[in-house]
Amino acid sequence: MASKRQISVGGVKIGGGAPVVVQSMTLTKTHDVEATTAQIAALASAGCEIVRVAVPKTEDAEALSKLVRFSPIPVIADIHFNASLALKAIDAGVAAVRINPGNIGGPDKVESVVKAAKAKGVPMRIGANAGSLPEHLQELAREDTAEALVVEAIEQVELLERLDFHDFKISVKASHVPTMIRAYRMLSDKVPYPLHLGVTEAGTPFSGSIKSAVGMGALLMDGIGDTIRVSLTADPVEEVKTAYEILKALGLRERGPVMIACPSCGRDNVGVENLAKVVEERLQTYPEAFEVAVMGCAVNGPGEAGDADFGIAGGRDVGFVYAHGRVLKKVSSDILIDELFFEIDKWIAEGMQRPKRLKMAKPAALAMAEASLIPLE
């Protein structure tokens, strides 16, 4: 079920009905302030809303105050094994800390971090990872990894609750997608706290994006999940792009255009794959939310993609530009894409008003046949 509690990470609301938040993590050495700041800026430009930085050493903790000051988005300090680094991070003004209460040095160390976090109003992320479950859960993990993840998470929750600390979100990440889905579903039934979703160590952009979309998409459709990170072996900007594509596909967030394109088939007279690639690349410069369809022939354009704001349907020598379910013009194929973006830019400049749509009374093929009689521009 959806989380009932809400936390605030540097002013970004998480859980309790807030929109799903996109986050990522820097790849740079955190103590390299210049490089880390540049990467955070690139992530923020891509739409990242909160960013995590690794803090394995004292020199990384000492750089946090500058990073917090320079960063345009809230910074989370990722800390393991060393409670003193968590305390330094909190003093540096980070928006949140990610710790694992099971490996931070014992209950007294956890208590010291919680006390500091409460004093500064700093939330935490806690949780379990399938690759680093504690020794006492190894036997259970061999029988049911998802259950072991949930048991570990609940143990951490109970520890923080005993310390009267409730300002946290939880993760139970695994690289095996079915395990990850089962773990989050079980955990969501047991806790009211916000949940951070992720398929850990998902992989390269191709396979990792698919695994992340399947795992997180299944949960998000059930209303489970408040923040997401797509963990790719790639530039973290790609993580943010993929995250938004997942959220846009589910209708949960809007950021930039959505493109739909028909599969190649025997009616393709224009090379729809190349056409779609060019359109998709040009759409990346638009922050506005709208939908564009790219069709490979003039048969089913307005029918199969009739809900799109704009679209093109290609042909051997001519193509069609349509908008809001209606054919706008017939143009030469060599200027088809330019004409599409001319109409998009004009629409944006005029305020992005979407006209009331009339129910299409004619089959798509007939509509296109009639449109073929339009003089070529």
Image (cartoon, rainbow, N blue to C red):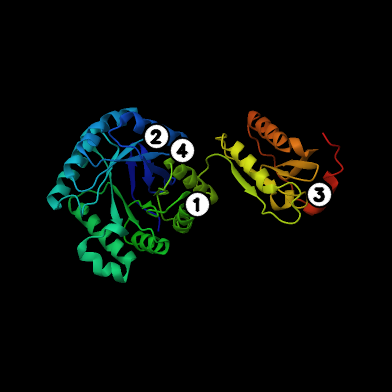
Q: Residue at x 47, y 47 (%)?
A: 243
Determine the CA span between mark 2 and mark 1. Answer: 22 Å
Locate residue 235: give its quadrant.
Answer: top left
| Front disc: 2 or 4 | 2
Of the two numbered discs 2 and 1 on the same chain, state the one appearing first in sequence: 2
Q: Amino acid at mark 3?
A: Ala
Determine which residue is flagged by label 2: 39
For mark 3, give the secondary structure. Answer: helix
Q: Give the quarter of the figure containing the N terminus.
A: bottom left
Determine the CA span between mark 1 and mark 3. Answer: 38 Å
Determine the CA span between mark 4 and mark 3. Answer: 39 Å
Q: Residue 322 got which mark?
A: none
Disc 1: CA contacts within 10 A as few (<14), some (14-19) or many (>=20)? few
Determine which residue is flagged by label 4: 47
Question: In x, y percent, where is residue 55?
Answer: 26, 40
Q: Amino acid at mark 2?
A: Gln
Q: Nearer the viewer, residue 92 or 163?
A: 92
Q: Residue at x 26, y 31 (%)?
A: 63
Residue 176 visible in the picture? yes
Disc 2: CA contacts within 10 A as few (<14), some (14-19) or many (>=20)? many
Q: Amino acid at mark 4?
A: Gly
Q: Give the quarter of the figure containing the C terminus.
A: top right
Question: In x, y percent, where is residue 40?
Answer: 38, 34
For mark 1, give the secondary structure. Answer: helix
Determine which residue is flagged by label 3: 367
For mark 2, give the secondary structure. Answer: helix
Determine which residue is flagged by label 1: 206
| Front disc: 1 or 3 | 1
